[in-house]
Amino acid sequence: MQTPARKGLAVADRSSHLRLWLTAGLGLALDLAAKSLGWTLLGGLPPPDGTGREIVLIPGWLRLVASLNPGIVFGFNFSQMLGVGPVAGRVLTVVLTLATSALIFYVFAASQPGQKWMHAWCGLILAGALGNLYDRMMYERVRDFIQITAHAEVGGLVLQWPYVFNLADIYLVVGVVAVALVYLSGRGPQHAETRPPHAKDARHERP
């Protein structure tokens, strides 16, 4: 039975849940499949001398290269930032991942059934968080394999994206930016219309 507080929210709407979990499930499956395929093609992690295999997809722009990342996303590493050991760093990373997932579910739960794109963005973030969490639980690190090799030179300074990443990283960045833009535009869950469709607008009521 729906409580008055939950009635009219996405958390109590089946279609909203379907959008959230379908996006999260498909995104997670695609991320894990891409990691498995990428590492199979690359033959696993390269040896310390850096002679491991790489696959050039677009010359001068994009290549595949195997890398194990102990951090969160795009090389962000708790162990190095806080000066703690690798075990403590992994624990903190897992805790942060679970906290982020809980926060994103709260954002979804507080949204309205009509905010379909919000549900998709939340599902995308969950897919990214769970995809990298799976790697940490199974391999103690995250499997990265995509590297942008394109670069530009500005005033003698070479600009190039320094990190190897995966699909889960893309999900997280795109999803977080999209949700942030929704809130900044004033269309976040707390600003959504909650009145029933038949409610009268007080501005048009006669005295």
Image (cartoon, rainbow, N blue to C red):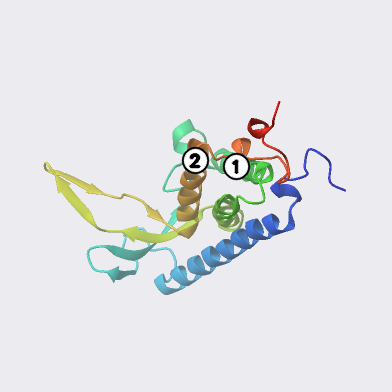
Q: Residue at x 40, y 70 (%)?
A: 42
Residue 199 vs residue 182, the one in the foreground: 199
How far apart in space, not on screen, are marks 2 and 1 (Cα)? Answer: 14 Å
**Residue 158, image x, y percentages:** 18, 47
Q: Which residue is mark 1?
A: 100
**Residue 204, image x, y percentages:** 65, 34
Q: Amino acid at mark 1?
A: Thr
**Residue 23, image x, y percentages:** 59, 60
Res. 72 in view? no
User: Dot 1: what SS?
Assistant: helix
In the image, taking residue 41 as reference, residue 116 lies left or right, namely right
Q: Which residue is mark 2?
A: 180
Asked if the residues shown at circle 2 and circle 1 are in contact, with their CB atoms under 8 angstroms apart, the answer is: no
Q: Quadrant of the C terminus?
A: top right
Q: Residue at x 48, y 72 (%)?
A: 37
182 lies above or below 164: above
- Name which quarter of the figure residue 27 lies in: bottom right
Res. 191 in view? yes
Residue 153 vs residue 44, the one in the foreground: 153
Q: Amino acid at mark 2?
A: Ala
User: Which residue appears farthest toward the top when viewing the image?
Assistant: 207
Earlier-in-chain disc, 2 versus 1: 1
Q: Residue at x 60, y 58 (%)?
A: 138
In the image, taking residue 197 as reference, residue 117 lies left or right, namely left
User: Dot 2: what SS?
Assistant: helix
Query: Pointer 2: residues within 10 angstroms few (<14), some, or many (20+)?
Result: few
Residue 63 vs residue 200, the one in the foreground: 200
